[in-house]
Amino acid sequence: MAREILTLKGESDGTSTSGDFPLYSDLLYHDSAPYTPPTKVLIPYGMKAKIWAKRIAAEAETLFQIYWSKDATVTSPTWELLDSQKLASKGELALEKRRPTVIRSLTGKEGFKASWSQPTASKAYIELEAEITDEE
Amino acid sequence: MDGVVDELGLVQENAFLSVFIPATSKAFVFRVKSRVNRGFESFHYGPLPLPATLPLPSYVGGTILVPANGVMPATAYTDTGLSFPLSGAFDETDMWYVPKEWGDRLFHVKTQVTPGWLRVDLQIPKGVSQRRFQREKVSLGLEKLFGYSRGSAEAIHFPNIHYGYRFGNDSNLSVYTGVDFTYGEYVVEIPKDSELIFNILTRRAPSYWLTMPISVYDASIKRAFTETYGIEGFTVYPVTKRSEAISEYNTLLKEVKV
């Protein structure tokens, strides 16, 4: 059985009212062009992504959303909303899950991303504990 | 497995190890006389030996250059198997290789790679893919839909053969890598009692069984076996063919070098 837990951290640019979080982790390489931080995670063929925890923070009202796509490999994937949390004002929230959010890779093309949306642009932060595994 | 393997899954001293070769339907039986690295079986090797600028094929077509030492680019895989260099080793380009003259040494190697989703398969010898489906009908491996494991591999490293470890990253994430080995450096002998060998290979005597991913019997494997051990292994007989087996084993034992 294979498994890896990634702590994925994202930070909004503070100037856009919406966008996809660029994702950073100790395992992710993005030191030189064209290797920029990914804004989506493509789940390896036959495996699952399990999101066990989500920690969010923002300087102002922010909607945090997790999307998944059946085909995240195309240039403009069709994203479907999977999970949503809103901070009504400046603050932070830590959500630990006994049962994770699960996204299955049935074709090797499935993926997920995390996005922010705000009425007024400000800094927003997200941290995901995402496990990539072939276990049930 | 009581008494045969320890909590690491390595064979205990004075226990038996059976290594089955599917391509020949034969097996080697070894008695582990000692494990010379008892107490220090874990080795964090470090990043995969992927040098920067090494071109790798991609699952989506084309070629990708390794961006930095030890980094596995997104959607890339190693076409030719990797060896693990180690300064001072008998062959400094391949730490698990020993010559045929070291036939009493056997490495039992459990490899764990980070991140754990990386695909892994083994070439034995290096450059020869061993994964097949429906005889020779379909070649398998980490560049195909199946015929690989993820994150780990277990192998017995026979002397006189260079193995190639292949890795594949079918995610969109370019990743730093790490390799952890849990290994036993065994001093072994082939038991000289044909009755005992028969009992082990009919699973009536306890032994740790490991089936090697050798479905293609490359000439170099045959040569390595005969030059190192004097034999190509013991035919695995059903329990009903005891006398035939004992007779064959007695003949083979006259040729055994280890």
Image (spheres, coloured by chain):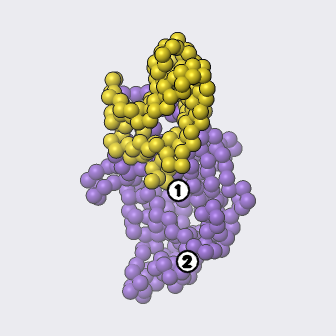
Q: Quadrant of the C terminus of chain B?
A: bottom right
Tell me which residue sits at (38%, 58%) in the image: B215
Drawn side of residue B58 relative to residue B87, left or right: left
- In front of the other: B53 or B6: B6
- In front of the other: B95 or A118: A118
Report which residue position mark 2 lands on.
Answer: B206
Q: Quadrant of the N terminus of chain B?
A: bottom right
Tell me which residue sits at (50%, 58%) in the image: B224
Label 2 packing within 10 angstroms: few (<14), some (14-19), many (20+): some
Any part of residue B258 in sight = yes
Using the numbered discs, state the Cα–Cα distance from disc 1 to disc 2 in whole angstroms. Answer: 20 Å
The subunit carrying tag 2 is B
As drawn, the chain in purple is: B
Q: Residue furthest top?
A: A15
Q: Residue furthest front?
A: A88
Q: Is residue B16 above or below residue B215?
A: below
On the same chain: label 1 and label 2? yes
Q: Picture coordinates of residue B122 (x, y %)?
A: 46, 50
Q: Picture coordinates of residue B75 (x, y %)?
A: 42, 33
Element type where label 2 sits in the image: loop
Element type where label 1 sits in the image: strand
Mark nearer the N terminus (1 vs 2): 1
Numbered label attached to residue B154: 1
- In front of the other: A127 or A74: A127
Q: Picture coordinates of residue B31 (x, y %)?
A: 61, 72
Q: Is residue B248 above or below residue B138?
A: below
Tell me whether circle 1 and circle 2 mark residues in contact (CB < 8 Å). Answer: no
Mark 1 residue type? Glu
What colour do you see for chain A? yellow
Label 1 packing within 10 angstroms: few (<14), some (14-19), many (20+): some
